[in-house]
Structure formats: structure tokens, C-alpha cells
């Protein structure tokens, strides 16, 4: 791999004298990893590798972890390995930068990685390299340790280019690692395919979660529920602050970092009309106690599985009559969607059921210019003015998991036991929408829960958080009375 051995130093680094370099290369105690240490979910890795290898017989597959991305000048964004790489290796840490999993045609998995620096090799990389050096960014495994952790054979990253000197058909997960993309795009790599089929297969491999994955997702959901409670407890202080949304964002994100790797996606803290902006992540507004708060957030575990939950809460602790009407329509839509979930049901059934309830409710309010039936027709869709997005998605290592899967296996497919998904209908009544009565303008409500498909239906993983109007008011009152 080009330039992988170069030292990354900053312009403000102090010079290293020969005397210091020699002194730094001597008298370090050994610090081996425990021989009993294994990556989480270790027992499932071999089966995952076998299934993806069987999908491409006779081919070599390359699945990269990805590269660092510059945030500003010489500061990088926090690194998170690509989800497919994490799924197949169990390696989820920030030290995985630039590593590549290779699955050979015989099904053997080989990790090409940047091993721990030898402190006596004369380069001083362990203390001089700001980007990868151990004293700057933490310890990496050596080759033997990596093999022991994962059960995969480990090789030095510098040896990866040698794979492209033969004629073995090779398939690459492209657009993840620009260094690997450049390497596989060279003339000597003319047996390499980058057509998206591998990305689709890797997504489809994650459609059905194994029991360990469901446990990780439940852990994420549980931490997320605790974070929502933290947000309610922070309301009094946030209501007094000129950017109260930021105070609440901080409360949730603190829980995410304390209990997991962080947030699974940018936290949405949308008060008042901000809730009508579907991906509001600016979170810089004040809080008005007469308005609602839409909180969409998820904790990502250290194993990189994320929850995705939304609650819409009255900032005063009590819904107004108009707010209650909107909320209960969305809740009825969500309940209708959840009722469709079972093995063999179409993935799209829950969205259709939820949207029927939404359209009928809007019709009863006199908002739609046509009947609910006409609005629901494929050549109409007028109800969507008030609810633009789909009502849910798969959930897992990515918040929108399995996104590269083929339509016939996902969007146009059927549900199977072990799938984990969200159900999240919403109404977004824009503040400047003249088709709405003034009392409803600027109101945004979304209710989102995480569910796992079971043998005979679905289990609500996020049941610890209340969904009903009365349940939310009681829950908020109890949390606020703790102060």
C-alpha cells in the first residue's frame, strides 16, 4: 500500500535528536494481549465468512475498513470501521484504519493490517508518527495477536499489493478506501471487479440478525432509553438556555459516550417548527414550553450496533388539545404498522397500513382536497404533503442497515424471523402551510420504535419508553419530580 510506512508528523513537532531516538528505542517492558482475548461475537464470524465466500465461488474478495478523513488541517474525524468489515472481522476500534479483509477463493480469511510498531526497529514510528504511532493514538495488535483475536490469518498491509500480480479473479468493496480503490484501479489489477454486487451481498448477509446481534441491538436500545430519560431530566436547565436544543443534545450524547461508542447517527433535537425539518441536526434553537420536542437519537454500542428511537414530548410536560390530536393520529398509524409485522409479510405492508391511517385522519380533519382513498392512489399521493418519508427501515450496524441490498430481497421482499427494523410514521405540518388550520401549523410529530421479527409476530425492543399520551405525561412527571 502506497506511503503506509511514512511517518506523519506535524509542522510544530519538536526535532528528534539521535540521542533521543536511541534512548526511546530501549528498555520497554513487554505488554502482550491476553491469549484468551477474542473479539465480541467471535463464534459467528466463521459462518459469516463462509456465506459470503459461497456467494462468489472461485473469487478473491476484498473488504476494507476505510481510511481516516481530514476534519480540519491536521485533525482527522474520529474513525469508525466500515460496517461490512466490522461484521466479518469483529474488529470495531479506531486502530483499524487502512486495514483490509481478504477472503481467498478457498474461503480462508486473511487480515492485512498495520501491525504494532517494533520499538527497536530504528524508525521510531511508535512515538514519531502522529497518525498511527502508539504513543499518539494507542496500541495496535501485532500479527499474532490479531490472528488470535479473530481466528483469521494475519499479514502485513505492505504485502497487499502482491495479490494483484496474479490472475485470480478479485472483487472489491469499492468507494470505502480510496487508497485501495487506487491500487485496484491500476493496470496490473485488470482481473478486479468493482460492480456493486459485493456491496449488495454484504448488505444482504446482515438482513437476518443472529442471536448475538439481537442482544447487541437490545443493549443499544436500553442505553438509548436511559439517554431519553436523561434528556427529560435536563429539561429545566435547557428551557432556561438560549440554545436549549444543544443542552438536550449534550445530555443524550453524554450517555452515548459513557455507555457505548457514541451516537449511531447525528442526534436530532427539534423543538417547535424545527420538528418539521426531517433531518434537523443544527440543534441550536431555544425551547418554548408551549411547543413539542421531537427527539430522534440512538446509542451505538462498542460493537457498533445502533438503536434508532424517536419520541415527541410536550416541553411543558402536558400535551395541548391540538398537540394531542396530532400525536394520537401518528400513534394510531404506528400501531397499525406494527400490527402487520410477522414472518412472511411484505416489508412494505407496515408502511401501507400506517399511511392509510394517516390519510384517513387527514381527511377527517378536512385537510385533504380529495378523499383518503383518492389520496392513497399511486397516481395521487397527496397525503404525502404532510408526511414525506417512508415509515421505517432495517436496523443494525448502520442506522439504515442493509441499504445496498437488492430491492427484491429488502424493499420488495418479505420479513423473516431475526430481522430488526424500525416503524416510524410522522406528521410534519409546516409553519407556512396555508392548507392547514393555524392551530396545527408548525407541529411535527414522529414516533419511532425498534422491533425484532419473531416466529409469530414482532417484539417491541423499545418498550421501556412510553408511547401513549398518558404514558408520556406520567413518565415525564416522574422524572422531573426527581429533582
Image (cartoon, grey):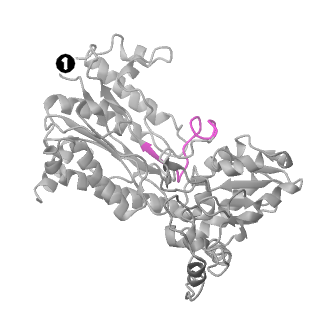
**Residue 39 showing in the rendered view:** no
**Magenta region includes residue 418:** yes
The residue lying toward the viewer, choosing from 340 and 297, is: 297
Q: At which x and y percent is residue 480?
A: 13, 53
**Magenta region includes residue 208:** no
**Residue 168 showing in the rendered view:** yes
Q: Residue at x 30, y 21 (%)?
A: 362
Dot 1 crowding, Cα within 10 Å, few <14, some 14–19, many 20+: few
Q: Is residue 439 left or right of residue 401?
A: left
Q: Vertically, is 259 above or below 183?
A: below
Q: Residue at x 74, y 60 (%)?
A: 103
Under tag 1, what secondary structure? loop
Q: Quadrant of residue 470?
A: top left
Q: Is residue 449 left or right of residue 120?
A: left
Start-end of magenta stretch:
406-422
Residue furthest to the right: 167
The overriding secondary structure of the stretch rendered in magenta is loop
Q: Residue at x 72, y 71 (%)?
A: 153
Q: Vertically, is 2 above or below 115?
A: above
Q: Which residue is mark 1?
A: 438
Say which quadrant the N terminus sits in. bottom right
Q: At which x and y percent is residue 194?
A: 74, 43
Amino acid at each position: 500500500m502506497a506511503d503506509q510506512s511514512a511517518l506523519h508528523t506535524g509542522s510544530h513537532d519538536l526535532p528528534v535528536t539521535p540521542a533521543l531516538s536511541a534512548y526511546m528505542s530501549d528498555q520497554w517492558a513487554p505488554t502482550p494481549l491476553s491469549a484468551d482475548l477474542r473479539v465480541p461475537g467471535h463464534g459467528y464470524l466463521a459462518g459469516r465468512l463462509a456465506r459470503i465466500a459461497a456467494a462468489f465461488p472461485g473469487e478473491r474478495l476484498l473488504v476494507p475498513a476505510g481510511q481516516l478523513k481530514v476534519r480540519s488541517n491536521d485533525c482527522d474525524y474520529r474513525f469508525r470501521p466500515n460496517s461490512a468489515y466490522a461484521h466479518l472481522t469483529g474488529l470495531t476500534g479506531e486502530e483499524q484504519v487502512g486495514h483490509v479483509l481478504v477472503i481467498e477463493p478457498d474461503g480462508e480469511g486473511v487480515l492485512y493490517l498495520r501491525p504494532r510498531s517494533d520499538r527497536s526497529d530504528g524508525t521510531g514510528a511508535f512515538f514519531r508518527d502522529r497518525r498511527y504511532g502508539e504513543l499518539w493514538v494507542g496500541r495496535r495488535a501485532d500479527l499474532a495477536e490479531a490472528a488470535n483475536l479473530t481466528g483469521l490469518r494475519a499479514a502485513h498491509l505492505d504485502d497487499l499489493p502482491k495479490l494483484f500480480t496474479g490472475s485470480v479473479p478479485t472483487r472489491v468493496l469499492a468507494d470505502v478506501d480510496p487508497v485501495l480503490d487506487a491500487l485496484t484501479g491500476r493496470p496490473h489489477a485488470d482481473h478486479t471487479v468493482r460492480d456493486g454486487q459485493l456491496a449488495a451481498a454484504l448488505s444482504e448477509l446482515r438482513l437476518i440478525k443472529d442471536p448475538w446481534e439481537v442482544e447487541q441491538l437490545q443493549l443499544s436500545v436500553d442505553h438509548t432509553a436511559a439517554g431519553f430519560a436523561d434528556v427529560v431530566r435536563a429539561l429545566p436547565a435547557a428551557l432556561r438556555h438560549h440554545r436549549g436544543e444543544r443542552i438536550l443534545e449534550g445530555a443524550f450524547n453524554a450517555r452515548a459516550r459513557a455507555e457505548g461508542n457514541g451516537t449511531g447517527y447525528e442526534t436530532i433535537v427539534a423543538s417547535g417548527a424545527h420538528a418539521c425539518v426531517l433531518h434537523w441536526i443544527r440543534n441550536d434553537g431555544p425551547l418554548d414550553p408551549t411547543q413539542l420536542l421531537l427527539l430522534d437519537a440512538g446509542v451505538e454500542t462498542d460493537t457498533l450496533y445502533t438503536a434508532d428511537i424517536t419520541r415527541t414530548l410536550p416541553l411543558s410536560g402536558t400535551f395541548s388539545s391540538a398537540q394531542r390530536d396530532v400525536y394520537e393520529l401518528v400513534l394510531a398509524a404506528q400501531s397499525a404498522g406494527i400490527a402487520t409485522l410477522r414472518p412472511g409479510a411484505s416489508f412494505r405492508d407496515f408502511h401501507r397500513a400506517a399511511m392509510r391511517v394517516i390519510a384517513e385522519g387527514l381527511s377527517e380533519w378536512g385537510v385533504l382536497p380529495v378523499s383518503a382513498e383518492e389520496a392513497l392512489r399511486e397516481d395521487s399521493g397527496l397525503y404525502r404533503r404532510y408526511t414525506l418519508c417512508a415509515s421505517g427501515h432495517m436496523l443494525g450496524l448502520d442506522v439504515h442497515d442493509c441499504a445496498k441490498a437488492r430491492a427484491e430481497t429488502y424493499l420488495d421482499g418479505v420479513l423473516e424471523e431475526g430481522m430488526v427494523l424500525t416503524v416510524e410514521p410522522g406528521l410534519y405540518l409546516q409553519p407556512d402551510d396555508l392548507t392547514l388550520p393555524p392551530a396545527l401549523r408548525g407541529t411535527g410529530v414522529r414516533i419511532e420504535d425498534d422491533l425484532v421479527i419473531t416466529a409469530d409476530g414482532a417484539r417491541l425492543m423499545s418498550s421501556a419508553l412510553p408511547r401513549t399520551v398518558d404514558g408520556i405525561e406520567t413518565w415525564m412527571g416522574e422524572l422531573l419530580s426527581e429533582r
